[in-house]
Image: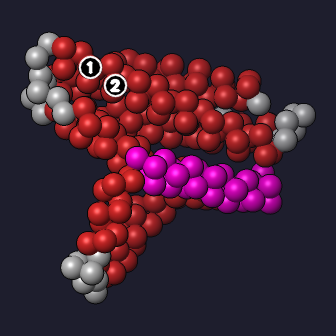
Amino acid sequence: MLGLVKKDLLMIKGNIRQVILFLVVFLVLAFQENNIIVIVPVFVSMMVFITTFSYDEYNKWDAYAIALPISRKNIVKSKYIASVILWLIALLVTVVITVIMGIIGQNINYFEMFGMILGCVFSIVLLEAIMFPLIFKFGVEKGRIGLFVGVFAIAALLGFIFTGVDLENATGFIEFFNKYYYILLPLAIIILLMGSYFVSKRIYLKKEF
């Protein structure tokens, strides 16, 4: 399985110039707006990783891979592991740049930045948790369409729910979340990744190529 993870990470090297360009633009913007620090690197890591599915689909990798002595479960698992490695690298870049900006005199609220980073990671993991099973099921292009439909459906559902919620009665939950978000968000991230992995594995085990 380690070889499968390396395969995905090596494929990303082909996009290294685009990544560097994004990071240069990101650095310029970061000095003007600190909040953008937490958004760009992780978002770029997800977009870059999605290209590995495109490469696999274009080269008919899956049909070849299942003919090898590799379990389908490990093929799916390697995708999730590689994606986690990539956004962890993106987080490291974010932290390093944040510290550098703080050292050179930028006004950085580290506690607030930590909360924003967790929220950003949760958002990216939520998108991946929805998108990966769709890609395994329908392919990259249809998977992207399904993602947009799913995101709009979730947004509409949440909007409908919150319109019927009395915010005064929800203050207890909001206070609880604000107090323990550093525990709740990592737990939610783990649950999303595990749930998405099991759905993708189930799809891939039954899929014919």
Number of callouts in the render?
2
Residue 191 visible to an observer of this rendering = yes
Disc 1 and disc 2 in contact, CB within 8 angstroms: yes
Q: Residue at x 79, y 36 (%)?
A: 65
Which sits in the foreground, 102 or 160?
A: 102
Neighbourhood count class around disc 1 (C-alpha, 10 Å): few under 14, some 14–19, many 20 upward: few
Q: Tell me where residue 120 appears, x and y as whole percent.
A: 35, 45
Q: Is residue 174 left or right of residue 132?
A: left
Q: Which residue appears at 24% of the width and 40% of the height?
A: 112
Res 48 seen here: no
The residue pinned by badge 2 equals: 95
Residue 155 is left or right of residue 147, and the answer is left
The range drawn in magenta is 182-209
Residue 52 found in image quarter? top right
Label 1: which residue? Answer: 99
Residue 62 in the image, given as x and y percentages of width and height: 74, 42
Determine whether the residue tagged by mark 2 lies in a helix, strand or loop. helix
> Residue 94 placed where, x, y %?
33, 27
Check residue 197 for magenta coloring: yes
Residue most toward the top?
104
Vertical arrangement, residue 185 with respect to residue 152, above or below: above
Task: Judge by depth and name the residue closer to the eye, 190 or 20.
Answer: 190
Give the structural element (helix, strand or loop) at label 1. Answer: helix
Quadrant into which the N terminus falls: top right
Q: Amino acid at mark 1?
A: Val
Res 48 quadrant in image: top left
Q: Is residue 193 left or right of residue 144?
A: right
Up-down: is 199 above or below 16?
below
Let me know if residue 37 is in the magenta part. Answer: no
Q: Main secondary structure of the magenta part?
A: helix
